[in-house]
Image (tube, rainbow, N blue to C red):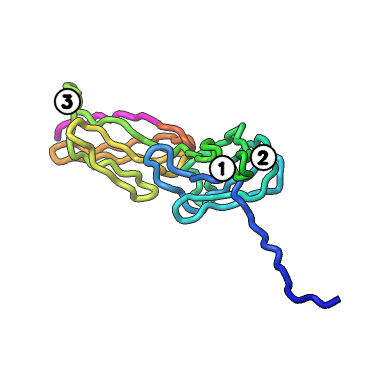
Amino acid sequence: MEIDSVSTLEIRHRAAICGYVRDADSGVGISGATVAIAGGPSRTQTRADGFYYFVDLPDGAYTLQAAAPALGSRYAGVSVAGVTTARDGAGRPVLDPKGNLALPPTRLSGRVQRTGTLAPVARAEVRLRAGGVKTLSNNLGQYLFSAVEAGTQTVQISAPGFVPASQSVTLNAGQNTVVDFTLAPS
């Protein structure tokens, strides 16, 4: 029997679960985060924009676990149960929006105030000594660090016309620690 033509078998992989891993505060995608299906060997990493996907999964409900181990303790991991895979009437996958995952950043926030009156100190420099990261307080004396390393940090505060101060604080991964500081006039 002679074969006149050869048909090729086209293999198509379809996304079953996909989404973005983002910073829970800023919404910015997290590059290199790991997303795994709990209880299974499937795992993947996010692209530069935080996008990830799994292909050709059987229909059902899955638990996803996401973390950013390359970023140390700047984020806490998350686990999201009940992410489903299903197909519509035409056999196309129906993507579950629960596949979009948000990692809570490790944060330090608070206010810088004047001793005695508790008036806000604007433009006070607040510095994390270990990493050299710094910010300035706003007009209300508020400051914020987000996605910083967890652990014990020494915070240094200075502002023109005030005596500098420092304090040791403990930051927990994925949590917001609120610490207010008071500065005495010099």
Question: Which badge, 3 or 1, is on the more N-terminal residue?
Answer: 1
Q: Is residue 26 left or right of residue 124?
A: right
Q: Nearer the viewer, residue 147 or 87?
A: 87
Q: Which residues are magenta?
A: 177-186
Residue 99 is one of the magenta-drawn residues: no
Whether residues under marks 3 and 2 lie with C-beta atoms below 8 angstroms apart, the answer is no
Name the kind of residue labelled 2 in the image.
Ala
Per the image, the residue denoted by label 1 is: 66
Name the kind of residue labelled 3 in the image.
Ala
Q: Answer few, some or many: residues within 10 Å of disc 2's Cα (few below 14, many 20 plus, some between 14 and 19).
A: some
Question: Which badge, 2 or 1, is on the more N-terminal residue?
Answer: 2
Distance between the alpha carbons at the discs numbered 3 and 2: 50 Å
The quadrant holding residue 10 is bottom right
- Residue drawn at 21 percent across, 39 percent down: 124
Determine the secondary structure under disc 1: strand
Per the image, the residue denoted by label 2 is: 38
Determine the secondary structure under disc 2: loop
- Residue drawn at 49 percent across, 50 percent down: 51
In which quadrant is the N terminus drawn? bottom right
